[in-house]
Amino acid sequence: MVPNGSCRSLGQTSSYYTFSKSLRALPSMGLLVGNLLFHLQNLSKSMQIHSAELNAVRSAQLVGTFVPQVPGERFMPWSGTHHVIPKQTLRAAGWRVTKGMRPVTQVKPEEWLDLETGEIMTTAQARKQGSKLPLGRSPSDNAMVKRTRVEACTPSDRPFVAYLLKLRNHRGGLVAPLDTILNHWIDSECAGIRSTDKARKRKQLRTIITKRDLMANDTTMTKDLMLFNPNLTKQEMLEESAKLCTVLPVKAR
């Protein structure tokens, strides 16, 4: 027997004990919630730090885009328009041109950023005030000219012409004296040739150079084949000279 008003059914008793256990567990649950809030705060701080780091990186990248690619240049391209390259130009450079192919375009700069004053001006405005713009040909332009020249050659002349164009330096000429380059080609491609025949072979190669209008003289390329980099370092000049041995290794006799 239990006192009046104190009797409970089996289900009520079970609920009572469950509720009592929950009450006893409240302190540990509070601790759990506290720990969870603490970790959430740390995660939020960490995310803020990472966000700040990312913003710093983005800012550095943004500033980096305003640094000229070539040291010493005052102006850098700011905006431009896409110009379609004619299909006949692509075909002459060896492209496989089809009717359904999408147009191939190239961006031409039309506005420039003055890195000293922060002023943005058009090409015409910059020229009017006498500013010197870095309007040299792009690498894609140089590659297109090179491919056009090589593709215009006969199959027998192409290997030599491609070899010679690989040995251009960034000062408008070649990485070594022309005769040295010709002898290197002869030693590699005509292994075993008699020394008395070398002069005749050099003359044949010079005929190809003249016929294909590759060089203005023994030290200078024709205008459309010149490469220029006025800020070339001494180390880069030495590396250019080393191309003579890497572009065409001499074959074993």
Image (spheres, helix red, strand yellow):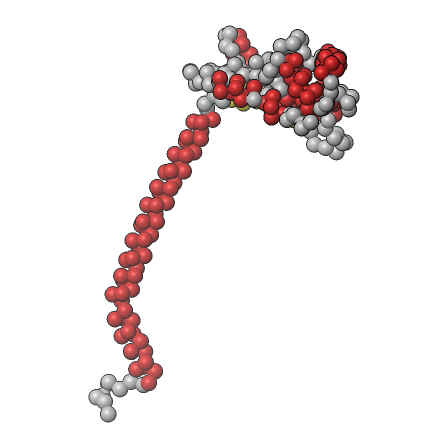
Most foreground residue, 242 or 33: 242
Q: Quadrant of residue 221?
A: top right
Q: How many numbered discs sit on the rendered protein? A: 0
Q: Nearer the viewer, residue 123 or 232?
A: 232
> In the drawing, does residue 135 fall left or right of residue 194?
left
Residue 68: x percent and y percent? 47, 21
Q: Residue at x 57, y 16 (%)?
A: 170
- Horizontal relation, residue 168 to residue 204: left or right: left
Going 72% across and 23% down the picture, which residue do you hit? 192
* Vertical position of residue 143 compared to residue 173: above or below: below
The one nearer the camera, 147 or 206, is 206
Q: Quarter of the image holding residue 35?
A: bottom left
In the rendered image, is residue 71 in sight?
Answer: yes
Q: Indicate left or right for 166 with 130 as reference.
A: right
Residue 183 at x, y = what percent? 67, 17
Residue at the left extreme? 3
x and y, in percent, of residue 50 in the image: 38, 42
The residue furthest bottom is 1
Residue 36 in the image: above or below residue 189: below
Q: Position of residue 191 (x, y in %)?
A: 71, 24
Identified at 34% across, 45% down, the residue is: 46
The quadrant holding residue 15 is bottom left
Please state, as top left, top right, bottom left or bottom right, where the C terminus lies in the image: top right
Decide: is 52 above or below 82: below
Q: Please indicate, yes or no, whether residue 113 appears anywhere in the rendered image.
A: no
Q: Nearer the viewer, residue 94 or 34?
A: 94
Q: Quadrant of the N terminus?
A: bottom left
